[in-house]
Image (cartoon, helix red, strand yellow):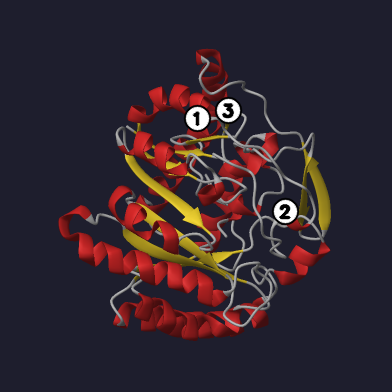
Amino acid sequence: MLKYIQVEITRECGENCIMCPHRKWKLSGRMSLEKFLELSKLFPKFDVVYLQGWGEPLLHPDFKDMLTIAEENAKTGFTTNGRKLKKLADFVAKHTDYLLVSFSGISSKARGVSFDVAIEGVRAVAEEKKKAGKEGKVRVGVSYMLTEESWKESVEFVELAAEAGAEYVAFTNLDYVFDEITDRLRVFGKGEKKIREVENVLNKAKTLARKLGMSVKAYPLNLEEQAVCEANPHTSAAVSCEGKLYPCIYLALPFEKIPRLFEGEIIYVKPPEFGEASNRKAWVEFEKFRDVFRKRIVAYNSTFEKLMCSSPFSAVRMLKELDDVLSKYPPPEVCTGCYKLYGV
């Protein structure tokens, strides 16, 4: 069983959030129900079908049908900005396994959807879950993007999210940095003093979340190259609204070359072309991409185990040898300059 397939049912969004590509580019596109049905033949191979891309999934006119189709084949989930969530609360509570409502601040104007509207969507789904009893299967979660405008409100956010009925909170980073504005807004990798300042507040927020009965996850603020990123392209996949197969949604942006601003340097990456996800040949080509990460992971884990069993060894020696392994087994070129590969 593969981990998950992320399906971008729409690239459309009515908001203009400052940290999102929609602010800079007019992104559009919508997957037809017919294409989704064709794609659904793949769903039984995956543990989770996640309806999310660069748009707002609840804007798709066939969202309910798509979620129902996915539900018949696997566990389901999606991320939403929350604007339309309240109206669909009953349906979401009964037909979704994982819900994540995105936030980035309480008083901040960086997001298009007001905090009050989004948190009321969370509350509505949590209440409908209670009413539904055994039929209410959804795990109600919230994600909180840490930016220069939001991190100070992390503790207050936890209080309000827990009061609204959220069961899970993820503190995420602004990890797709594509211009000077997003580079200024990110808080990760900004030096030890800044990171300590943010982490002090974040630790208080995490402690409070656990005290209030919420599960919590927080992404690191220091950059450290990983054997594989959280997208897990060796066990997961993404499909754009055009139906094309990609290793992750970050590589499914509709550009000839995807811009990334990585530690002050602008990098342009040509996205991979495997073809239609419904075409077997696309998966054959994708396997070659996956093998790069599989070999990298095996080499890294083997070296790590060897170092742990050797005696004595120093932390410096371990870090050097692990870095050497990652250099010897570089990631695919399209992953160059992606902050996700550095754990954030």
Dot 2 surroundings within 10 Å: few (below 14), some, or many (20 or more)? some
Residue type, mark 3 in image: Gly
Q: Which residue in the structure is indicated by mark 2?
A: 21
In this picture, is 115 found above or below 181?
below
Q: Which residue in the structure is indicated by mark 3?
A: 243
Which image quarter is the C terminus in?
A: bottom right
Q: Quadrant of residue 243?
A: top right
Circles 2 and 3 in contact, beta carbons < 8 Å: no
In this picture, is 80 found above or below 288?
below
If you read the primary sequence from the N terminus, does the residue marked by circle 1 or circle 3 appear first? 1
Q: Position of residue 55 (x, y in %)?
A: 61, 48
Which image quarter is the N terminus in?
A: top left
Would residue 29 appear left or right of 296 to someone viewing this image?
A: right
Which of discs 1 and 3 lies nearer the camera? The answer is 1
Q: Tag on residue 133?
A: none
Q: Tag on residue 33?
A: 1
In this picture, is 211 found above or below 55?
below
Residue type, mark 2 in image: Pro
In this picture, is 101 found above or below 148?
above
Residue type, mark 1 in image: Leu
Dot 1 surroundings within 10 Å: few (below 14), some, or many (20 or more)? some
Q: Quadrant of residue 241?
A: top right
Q: Position of residue 96 (x, y in %)?
A: 34, 50
